[in-house]
Image (cartoon, grey):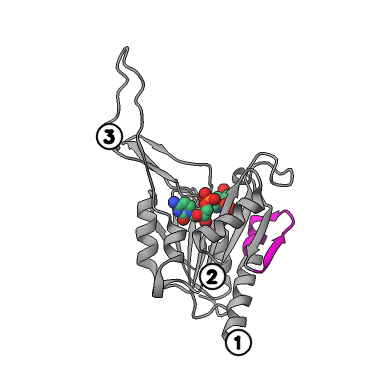
């Protein structure tokens, strides 16, 4: 990595959706493109960090200067993150599926004439962010989560920060109207975020995801530099 304020630090970043298989041809997924998480991985690398980017399926190129581990499911994402530890920084921008299909079919599920549609039984997925925040001696010094909300964005995200045990949570409103009129965050190059820490809430203006990433990486570097000086 290029020398910079994060030289000598290892950053673990998650990005993109996860796909939870139903059968060999179908899966449950969500609308994350990976743009925000990949931009953060690239921004941390530009500040000198060694970056491991654990990514669900996306159409994006690997950000320069990062090591990319590609996964499909939430369970694979958790295993890849645990394998990447120790890390100084964790940023969980992935939109991890909360549930997985309990018994994915080995063969393509067929439509039988007159038969009712299949009913999918779901089981909870592990929470990767909460796992990293509770990793004991392996816990990264700074654990940053994201919160995708559609109502009471800051209140819901603040509660999520405490529940998941992360240091900061970056809240974004993923409703149609919630991105400063730019359209849903998933399909947009822009994002409108609130940075929630133990000290309070910063409302950032609508910015490109690349600028959000650059600012967030700068804030992370400044915080770790301040802590090292204290
Ligand atoms: O990828 P883009 O199209 O650029 O869109 C960016 C984004 C909207 C996906 C991103 O900015 C974002 O908000 N990511 C988090 C999406 C999400 O799943 O939010 P959540 O509120 O459901 O989860 C809260 C936090 O827990 C997140 O840090 C998430 O990564 C983490 N989580 C959630 C569930 C789970 N099983 N494991 C997790 O680690």
Was residue 174 drawn as part of the magenta stretch in this picture? no
The label nearer to you, 3 versus 1, is 1
The structure residue drawn at horizontal position 42% and vertical position 61%, both measured from the top left corner, is: 131
> From what the image shows, is residue 122 above or below residue 50?
above
Quarter holding the C terminus is bottom right
The structure residue drawn at horizontal position 70% and vertical position 40%, both measured from the top left corner, is: 177
Numbered disc 1: secondary structure: loop
Between 218 and 102, which is closer to the camera in this rendering? 102
The label nearer to you, 2 versus 1, is 1
Numbered disc 3: secondary structure: loop
Query: Which residue lies most toward the top here?
Result: 114
The residue to which callout 1 is attached is 230
The picture places residue 171, in percent across and down from the top left corner, at 62, 54
The structure residue drawn at horizontal position 32% and vertical position 40%, both measured from the top left corner, is: 102
Q: Examine the image and state in which quarter residue 27 appears.
A: top left
The structure residue drawn at horizontal position 61% and vertical position 51%, both measured from the top left corner, is: 156
Q: Check mark 2 vs ligand 1: CB closer than 8 Å? yes or no.
A: no
The residue to which callout 2 is attached is 45
Residue extent of the magenta highlight: 199-214
The picture places residue 19, in percent across and down from the top left corner, at 41, 44
Instruction: Please say whether residue 62 is visible from this viewpoint.
Output: no
Rendered image: mark on residue 105:
3
């Amino acid at each position: 990595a290029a020398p910079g304020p994060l030289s000598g630090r290892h950053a673990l970043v998650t990005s993109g959706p996860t796909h939870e298989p139903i059968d060999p041809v179908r899966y449950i997924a969500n609308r994350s493109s990976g743009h925000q998480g990949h931009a953060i991985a690239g921004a941390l690398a530009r500040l000198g960090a060694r970056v491991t980017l654990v990514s669900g399926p996306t159409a994006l190129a690997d950000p320069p200067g990062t090591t990319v581990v590609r996964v499909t499911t939430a369970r694979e994402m958790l295993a890849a993150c645990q394998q990447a530890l120790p890390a100084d920084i964790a940023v969980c921008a992935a939109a991890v599926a909360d549930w997985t299909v309990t018994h994915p079919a080995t063969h393509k599920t067929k439509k039988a004439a007159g038969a009712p549609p299949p009913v999918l039984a779901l089981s909870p997925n592990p929470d990767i962010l909460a796992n990293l925040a509770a990793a004991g001696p392996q816990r990264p010094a700074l654990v940053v989560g994201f919160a995708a909300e559609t109502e009471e964005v800051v209140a819901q995200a603040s509660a999520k920060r405490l529940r998941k045990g992360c240091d900061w949570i970056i809240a974004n409103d993923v409703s149609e109207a919630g991105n400063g009129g730019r359209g849903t965050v998933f399909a947009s190059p822009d994002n409108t975020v609130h940075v929630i820490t133990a000290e309070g809430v910063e409302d950032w203006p609508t910015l490109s995801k690349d600028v959000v990433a650059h600012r967030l990486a700068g804030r992370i570097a400044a915080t770790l530099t301040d802590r090292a000086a204290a």
